[in-house]
Image: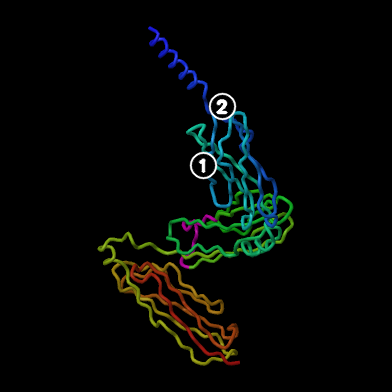
Amino acid sequence: MSLLRTTLTSIALLAAMFITAQSEITWLETAHDFGVINENDGDATCEFRFVNTGTDSVTIVRARASCGCTTPKYSQSPIAPGDTTIISVSYDPVGRPGRFKKSIYINTSASDERETLQVSGVVIAAEQTVKVRYPIEAGPLRLRRSLIALGEVDKGKSKTEFLDAYNVSRDTVYPKWINVPDYYTVLSAPKAIPPGEQATFTFYFNSVKCPTWDRVADTLSLVPAEGITPIDILSVATIEENFKRLTPGERMNAPAIAVSPQRIDLGIINRSDDIITKEITIENFGKRTLELRRVYAYNANVDVSVNKENIKKGKTAKVTVKIDPSKIEGEYLNAHIIIIGNDPERPKTTVRITAEIKD
């Protein structure tokens, strides 16, 4: 009986120890806002503290930041009950202008669940960083570039491109866009750009609404802030027809284009000469109607017109080219006539026109 009583007493003592020896911590803070910091001032550092409010010692098992710009430092020594420990967190602002929010993940022996700490703030960029990352001046804003290159866009599809901006002023700015074609939608995120913060302009290009084929160049104007002179941003896209879905049978029955001549050499002409007129013949030797999507010249001093846009099989169309020598700049003419059609094998044909200009 004595042995049984002793055993029960031991078990009771062990259970009591197990129940009372608990690991528990209490964080005094889990977020820190650095406010506005300058890139040139070096690392910004803050401290997070927790108290061991349990009855057993606690250790920090691991501290990991969400990116390499944030560095946590801590002691690996056990924290006794009632003691406080510090986790120091540093943020490197170099090359990182704008608002930031970073997370630090803490694992301790007190729980299987990790704690998330956060640091945030706004970095005011150094002048050199702004020049390198945002070289285009636009009043209080600096832009990453002045060209929106959309590349190739299938007719009927849309495409998206982005332009980053940075507010170098001390005021919040409300940029807006003007001279925007109907086939563009431009959004700003955020709409109001606080001092020292970044923004992104998103350009949505809808080729369905665009009436032009092949190369499309537009000038969109950004008004950075009220009363500031707009800055022009060039947007370039190439709208193409997608023939990939055609079956072999559809390709066999498609239109087929032949262009003659494919080069016109005017030789030597005088700048005082009258307007020169030349003709280009387009023939459809395919099985279906050839639709001319667009016929145009890259050169402003060359005028192009076509007598029909739909060419039935076995028929031809005439392209009239007019050149005004007095408007040609420089000593040479190197013009390109672009013919866009629905021939899947040859959707784009180029005719080159050359000349030497004498005064």
What is the crowding at mark 1: few (fewer than 14 residues within 10 Å), some, or many (at least 20)?
some
Magenta extent: 203-214
The image's mark for residue 62 is: 1
Which residue occupies the foreground of this view, 162 or 253? 162
Please give the name of the residue rendered at 48% of the width and 74% of the height, measured from the top-left corner.
Answer: 305
What is the crowding at mark 2: few (fewer than 14 residues within 10 Å), some, or many (at least 20)?
some
Membership of 209 in magenta stretch: yes
Disc 1 to disc 2, C-alpha distance: 19 Å
The image's mark for residue 235 is: none
Which residue occupies the foreground of this view, 235 or 273? 235
Which residue matches tag 2? 54
Q: Amino acid at mark 1?
A: Arg
In this rendering, the answer to whether 28 lies above or below 284 is above
Q: Secondary structure at mark 1?
A: strand
In this rendering, the answer to whether 133 lies above or below 25 is below
Instruction: Check the picture and name the quadrant holding the C terminus.
Output: bottom right
Asked if the residues shown at circle 1 and circle 2 are in contact, with their CB atoms under 8 angstroms apart, the answer is no
